[in-house]
Image (cartoon, grey):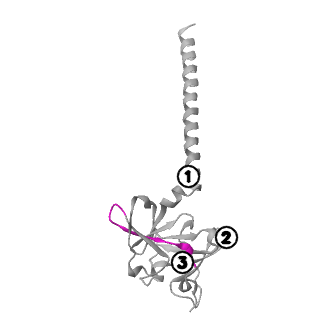
Amino acid sequence: MTTSNLDVASGAGLKEQDNGTRRTRLREFQARLVERMHAASAGAQASSSQLGVMVGQTRWLLKLQEAGEIVSVGSITKVPLTQDWFLGLTNIRGNLISVIDLAHFRGLPPTPIDKESRIIAFAPSLSFNSGLLVSRVMGLRNVAEMEPQARSEEDGAPWASQRYLDRESQVWTELDLSLIVQDPHFLHVGL
């Protein structure tokens, strides 16, 4: 064998070895992915990870099972003779969604709409075509790493279910969307 033939033969051997290593890593990745999917479907990961959002100046947590699509704020069509916290209707992928300014609903100043504002649609499982206007989305938060806090009298609303304190001493309140859609005040958008 000549030197160039040896180089070609050893290169082919390296490629086979490299392909074998890639296959092994791919199998390991797929196995880990399947494990995470099973854990999420069993609720282990879904119950500890929640979507963090800013509503006005307060931090809220939404259960991933209850939060639907997150979209930038587009055009919102006003509906006459409705509460001022009921912003109107918007179209999200062909579905009409009512948009609620949660901060204003809670008696705080209206949420200014800017480039960070988002609408969080309710999950289809809630059977409620609505969405909340939030100041910004903060990403996933792991409540298992937070310290539960006692409910205060100001929490009053049953849909503000639990408070947490994170490592940076920020207070987060869990918003139970399945309970807010049963609140008579939330349901009564007409004047």
- Say what secondary structure mark 3 lies in: helix
| Left or right: residue 108 compared with residue 168 | right
* Image: 110 above or below 17: below
Q: Residue at x 52, y 74 (%)?
A: 132
Of 173 and 69, nearer the camera is 173
- Report the amino acid beneath label 2: Gly
Of 71 and 127, nearer the camera is 127
The residue that disc 1 covers is: 39
Q: Check residue 180 in the rendering and tell me which mark sits there, or answer none.
A: 3
**Closer to the camera: disc 3 or disc 2?**
3
Of 4 and 140, nearer the camera is 140
Q: Residue at x 50, y 76 (%)?
A: 159
List x then y, in percent, for residue 165: 36, 66
Q: Residue furthest front?
A: 150
Task: Check contact, mark 3 vs mark 2: CB within 8 A.
Answer: no
Q: Earlier in the sequence, mark 3 or mark 1?
A: 1
- Report the amino acid beneath label 1: Ala
Alpha-carbon distance for marks 3 and 1?
Answer: 28 Å
Quick one: quadrant of the N terminus? top right
The magenta region covers: 166-181
